[in-house]
Amino acid sequence: MSIKNAVNFEDLRRRAKRHAPKIAFDFIEGGVDDEQGLARNDEKLAQIALVPRYLGDPSIPVQQTTLFGKTYAHPFGIAPTGAAALFRQGADLMLARTAAAKNIPFIISGASTATMEEIAAVARDISWYQLYLAKDRKISEDMVRRADACGFSTLVLTVDTPTQVRRERNIRNGMGRPMKPTWKTKFEALLHPQWMYAYYTGPKLTVSNWAKYVPQARNEEEVLDFFASQIPAPATWDDVQWIRKMWPRNLVLKGILHPDDARRAASLGVDGIMVSNHGGRQLDRAPSPIEVLPTIVEAVGEKITIMFDSGIRRGSDIAVAMSMGAKFCWVGRWTLYGVTAGGQAGADHAADMVSNQLAAVMRQMGATNTTDFGPSFLLWNNTEDLRRNSRS
């Protein structure tokens, strides 16, 4: 069945689950601890209603959005998703090619299988690099220099991974360093022959950007072991200042959830923040980003570019986040499910699915341009919102 027959996020999810064995699929889908954070992201977005404004301009809405001086075709990009090639061989490059074809930004994961230099060869103009700090800061410094040499416009420092967390699905499946899959896990993987064939006959997977720092490594497994020994390495505000001095272009912090942290980021010359709870994968009791977004916008909305990440499952979620003040949005699992389910065609279809859903929602709500998004479209508490909006 053609991947183009998938009509929504959930269709892609089901197809990805059929393709990848449980040990891999659970890594995509899972959260941390009781996975309340995953449910909270969905629940809090779903509670906010969009109030349509009819009888306006019936033309097809414009999705072009300018971010850090560059105009993209849509107000969303592809968030960093680590270990993508575990789910589909070559996934990192596929996602980059999709982003280049659709003219949307793509953030290279700090745990990518493709190197930043390989990504730059196919998608330099739209690629950003996600930096996970290493315990050896000389490695981080070299990665910043490499990203600069690649010509990437933006560096994304992920700040919400200060320590190892308990992703219980991974523990049960034996997913970790070292890998200890159970017999049940191994048997279940046999039910996914296409994935098994690619995994055992394709290139051995590793975190390729880290390979140069382990010149004595005898194989890919030893590079992975080194990576696991270097992260997590907590980032501090001193690190932010250090990177700001090194990095000559746009600097973004990913994982900000508190307005005071947003204020401090702005004071240190950071260009943007991604309001994110890491897709519910780090702190189970963290708020959903949509809950804290209004407070952060109020605190620094005129000083710094605020972007939204975590929990987007529908085009309407993007409309909600942007109406609440986000200037841009990021999808992670959506495109990762797409590439897992259908390779390059799946990645392309996932991106088209997001833009098509958003276009339909914009026409229905009466927004002719992404610049139209604002609080007049929102009802997230009660009808007092409408009375307040009518006065604004």
Image: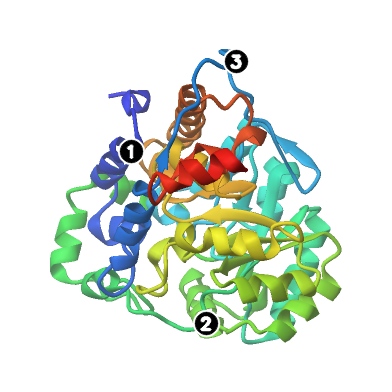
Does residue 37 sit above or below 50 in this rendering? below
Q: Identity of the amino acid at label 3? A: Asp
Q: CA distance from mark 1 to mark 2?
A: 31 Å
Q: CA distance from mark 3 to mark 2?
A: 48 Å
* Residue assigned mark 2: 162
Q: Which residue is nearer to you in this view: 52 or 221?
A: 52
Q: Using a 10 Å C-alpha cutoff, classify the residue at mark 3 as few (fewer than 14 neighbours), some (14 to 19) or many (20 or more).
A: few
Q: Using a 10 Å C-alpha cutoff, classify the residue at mark 1 as few (fewer than 14 neighbours), some (14 to 19) or many (20 or more).
A: many
Q: Identity of the amino acid at label 2? A: Pro
User: How many numbered badges does the structure rendering display?
Assistant: 3
Does residue 358 sit above or below 217 in this rendering? above
Q: Position of residue 94 (x, y in %)?
A: 54, 41
Q: Position of residue 299 (x, y in %)?
A: 66, 66
Q: Position of residue 272 (x, y in %)?
A: 70, 60
Give the secondary structure at mark 2: loop
Residue at screen point 60% across, 15% down: 57
Q: CA distance from mark 3 to mark 1?
A: 33 Å
Placement of the N terminus among the 4 image quadrants: top left
Residue at screen point 52% across, 15% down: 55
Q: Identity of the amino acid at label 1? A: Leu
